[in-house]
Amino acid sequence: MKKILLLFLVTPMLFLRAQESGENYYFKTTIGKTSSLEIIKNEDGAKLTEDLYIRKRAKVKVLRNEGDRVVFKYLNYTNNENLKTKYNGVDGDKEFSMQKEVFKGLTSPFYKYFRGFSLGSYSVPIRLRSSNGVFEFDNNLSLGINLIGRASPDRFNENFFFDVSAGLSITQVNLNEDNSGLGKGDFIDNSTQNPSAITFTFGLLVNLAKNVNVGGHIGWDALSTADNKVGWIYNKKPWFGIGLGISVGEPANNTSQNAENTGG
């Protein structure tokens, strides 16, 4: 029963975080013109005089920080000439500013479809193995590194994404009389062994909400020639791991550098 329960656990994933390089954001809500003119100012902090308001999901790019203000410009409006002139300016270089804390509260990052690579570690403690009619849940501990690529179809949602990983690690495997030649012949006096194997893994993890994910891995454990004299039946045979887990870290979710406003 304990092993069956553990089947639904993926050990927390630890990532090496890279500094975020994205500078694109979107406004989370629409604010009326009167209130907008109190919040958003010209780049030098002067009050705006034109008819302009904060529009929901309008995308902006942060240019620089000046004291307690953020200077930004709107990404180009592509299908509305009136909005393009008003928000982008004639040459597309019109700049605005806002208090940093206000900007932080009103915006969220606008992500790329592909959010980048990172190096990290996945541990799948329960592996499902089958060979020669023998099936078992195997509890293994691995130490290694994974190359992880992250992508998402939702550029507005930080917490919905897919991680595809490939990794190489060292794994302690469990040999016994049922899955090897232990207890027989030259190994009659030895019923268990725990040698180390080289493990190759490929995996897909789906992050459904903040810190909640489901995923699956396929891998191969390879013993050295010396260690496999005992004849482990799962040597170089694929295993599967499926789980539900909690993430304790994540690679940088870079924001898009090539987005545009579509108008409306």
Image (cartoon, helix red, strand yellow):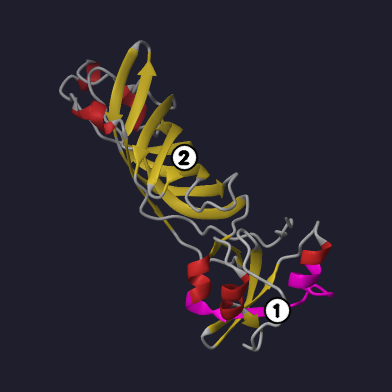
* Figure check: 174 above or below 210: above
Residue 96 percent coordinates (x, y): 66, 79
Lateral position of residue 4 relative to residue 58, left or right: left
How many numbered circles are shown?
Answer: 2
Query: Can you identify the residue that label 1 sits on?
Result: 95
Q: Which residues are magenta?
A: 84-101
Residue placed under numbered mark 2 in the picture: 205
Q: Amino acid at mark 2?
A: Leu
Left or right: residue 162 compared with residue 263: left
Q: Is residue 142 in the magenta section?
A: no
User: Quadrant of the rendered structure where residue 169 is?
Assistant: top left
Residue 19 appearing in the image: no
Q: Secondary structure at mark 1?
A: loop
In the displayed orientation, state which residue is furthest to the front: 34
Residue 163 appears left or right of 7? right
- Gap between marks 1 and 2, in whole Å? 40 Å
